[in-house]
Image: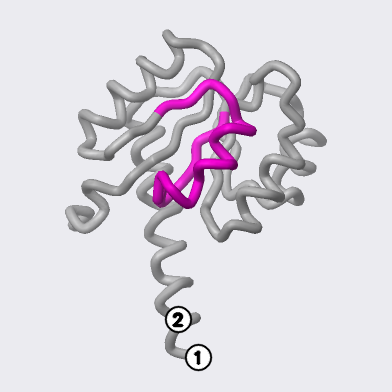
């Protein structure tokens, strides 16, 4: 079994419109030793991104008036990995969001264990990429 203890304590910024949604995700991730900050407005979250010092953003694709593609581009421009959560939208939408720089799109329904495992995988890859970039 792989030791993921170095991923404990990573700060996840969760952007989602519903209080129940944010509570459910926060509870699942806190149980996996992630620090989670939740916000309802993605524009406000983008403005506070540097201040929050998040290691990754989880974005609810179904936020009202959210242009997921633009949010992904802006977040990736800030150098932070992005995971989108949403309903099954079909392969075309999924592929378009991946082209817009999302690192992963997780379709509902999903378990807290699956979500935490996907986050760990993204953070591992991102951490390796950062390390290699510094070496070159």
**Residue placed most toward the observer, 95 or 57:** 57
Image quarter in which the N terminus is found: bottom left
Q: Which mark is residue 65?
A: none
**Residue at 76% from the left image edge and 31% from the top image edge:** 67
**For residue 68, what is the image quadrant?**
top right
**Residue at 47% from the left image edge and 71% from the top image edge:** 129
Q: Which residue is mark 2?
A: 132
**Tags 2 and 1 in contact by the CB under 8 Å rule?**
yes
In the orientation shown, which residue stands out farthest toward the bottom? 136
Image height of 14 relative to 5, above or below: above
For label 1, the crowd category at 10 Å Cα-Cα, with few meaning under 14, some 14 to 19 and many 20 or more, is: few
For label 2, the crowd category at 10 Å Cα-Cα, with few meaning under 14, some 14 to 19 and many 20 or more, is: few
Residue 37 image point, x, y percent: 37, 32
Q: Which residue is mark 1?
A: 136
**Residue at 74% from the left image edge and 48% from the top image edge:** 100
Image height of 38 relative to 136, above or below: above
Residue 126 image point, x, y percent: 46, 62
Q: Is residue 31 magenta?
A: no
Q: With 65 as the anchor, is 108 left or right in this view?
A: left
Image height of 113 relative to 128, above or below: above
Q: Is residue 42 magenta?
A: yes
Q: With 94 as the anchor, is 133 left or right in this view?
A: left
Which structural element holds mark 2? Answer: helix
Q: Which residues are magenta?
A: 38-59
Q: With 37 as the anchor, is 8 left or right in this view?
A: left
Q: CA distance from mark 2 to mark 1?
A: 6 Å
Which structural element holds mark 1? Answer: loop
């Amino acid at each position: 079994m792989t030791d993921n203890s170095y991923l404990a304590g990573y700060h996840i910024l969760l952007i989602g419109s519903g209080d129940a949604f944010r509570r459910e995700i926060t509870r699942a991730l806190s149980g996996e030793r992630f620090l989670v900050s939740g916000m309802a407005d993605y524009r406000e979250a983008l403005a506070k991104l540097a201040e929050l010092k998040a290691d990754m953003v989880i974005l609810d694709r179904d936020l009202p008036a959210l242009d997921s593609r633009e949010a992904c581009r802006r977040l990736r421009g800030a150098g932070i990995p992005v995971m989108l959560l949403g309903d099954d939208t079909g392969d075309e939408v999924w592929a378009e969001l991946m082209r817009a720089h999302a690192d992963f799109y997780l379709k509902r329904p999903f378990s807290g264990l699956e979500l935490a495992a996907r986050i760990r995988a993204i953070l591992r890859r991102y951490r390796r990429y950062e390390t290699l970039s510094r070496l070159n």
